[in-house]
Every structure is written in C-alpha cells, then in structure tokens.
Amino acid sequence: MRRTLTIATAAVLLAGLAACSNSKTGTTTADKPTALSKPATVSKPVNASTAFMKLSAMVDSAKLSGTVTAANDPNHLLGRPSQYASKVTFNDTRIKAGDVSGTDKGDVDRGGAIEVFATPADATARAKYIQAVTKSMPMLSEYDYVHGTVLVRVSHYLTPEQAAGYKTAANGIG
C-alpha cells in the first residue's frame, strides 16, 4: 500500500513538472526565487510577440528564441481552456552557456518565456501553479511576474537584481 502511494505521488509530481516545461536537470541553486506580482488591468489586448517587443526594449539582454505554436508546444496548453493563447521564449545573454547546457531550446532556464492568457485570473492561476510545483525543487524554480493577462517567466540563473528588470518590464506591458 505504501509503495503504491509513493509511486502515485511521484507520477503526479512528474506530470506537474512536465506541465511547467522547465527541463533543466542536475543543477541546484541556493537562491530560490518565488516572486509573484499582483495582476493589473491591461487596457488593450496583447499577444506574446508584442509583449516581447516591449519587454526587450527595456531589457537589452533578452533575445527572442522562439514562438510557440500548437505544433511545437511542449506543454500542449496553447489555446486550451484557461491556458495561454500565445507564447514566446527568449534567451538572456547574461546566463552562462555552461549553466544551461543540456537544456532544450526555449527552456525557461535559458532566459524565460512570455505567456498571454484570456483573463488576468488565468495568468495568475498559471503562475501560482508553477510556483507550487517548483517550490520544493530549487533547480526548477523561476521568477514569475503577472501583469494583467501576461505572465513573464524568468530563469532562476539570473540574480534577484537582474530579474527585477523583468518585473519592471512586465509592469510596462499592456
């Protein structure tokens, strides 16, 4: 009975981690960021591409690495009910290549991602879900900033001061 419960718990945890699409393995950090900003009202609809253009104008080290489509979405969440309607991934040039070797292109560890939702509540729910799943695993942690319908996910390889630039930029999207 105890073995069955342990296996079931492990399966649920692994499924949750897969939904976060943060495939970094092996490395841990002493820093465990868990920042969640309060959602704000966005005056006009925004998509992930336009949000990235605004963000990258404020964070010079952010470089677009990919646009997520239904065909290449590793999470299979794009367009699903209560999930993101658009998503892009980006690299941050301040992150050392050696820190992210073995990660997949588009992995949040390499810089981050922008996910745009239909409602602020959906964006906030996604951020809270990611934080809950990664809370006990520092090597999977990330900074998550919500502004209206936009969730900006940022690599834990950045210092809190570096990540703060993304928080400021996220507040300027919309």
Image (spheres, rainbow, N blue to C red):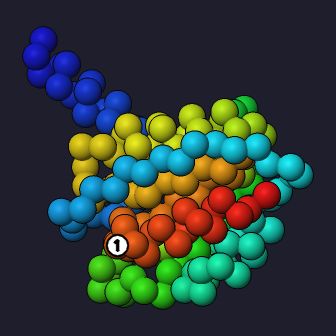
Side (left or right) of 45 relative to 27: right
Which residue is at the far right? Answer: 44
Observer-nearest of 58 and 100: 58
Give the residue displayed 41% in from the left and 43% down from the top. 131
Image x and y of residue 80, in percent: 71, 37
Residue 143 figure quarter: bottom left
Residue 81 figure quarter: top right
Which residue is at the far left? Answer: 2
Give the residue displayed 25% in from the left and 33% down from the top. 10
Residue 75 seen anywhere in this rendered image of the structure: no
The 10 Å Cα crowd at callout 1, few under 14, some 14 to 19, many 20 or more, is few
Task: Give the mark count.
Answer: 1
Image x and y of residue 106, in percent: 54, 70
The image shows residue 18, relative to residue 102, as above or below, that is: above
Give the residue displayed 48% in from the left and 47% down from the top. 36
The image shows residue 134, relative to residue 96, as above or below, that is: above
The image shows residue 54, relative to residue 8, as above or below, that is: below
Q: Secondary structure at mark 1?
A: loop
* Mark 1, residue position: 159
Image x and y of residue 63, in percent: 61, 83
Give the residue displayed 37% in from the left and 67% down from the top. 160
Query: Hey, what amino acid is under mark 1?
Result: Thr
Give the quarter of the figure containing the C terminus.
bottom right
Give the quarter of the figure containing the N terminus.
top left
Residue 55 seen anywhere in this rendered image of the structure: yes
Side (left or right) of 30 relative to 128: left
Image x and y of residue 50, in percent: 80, 68
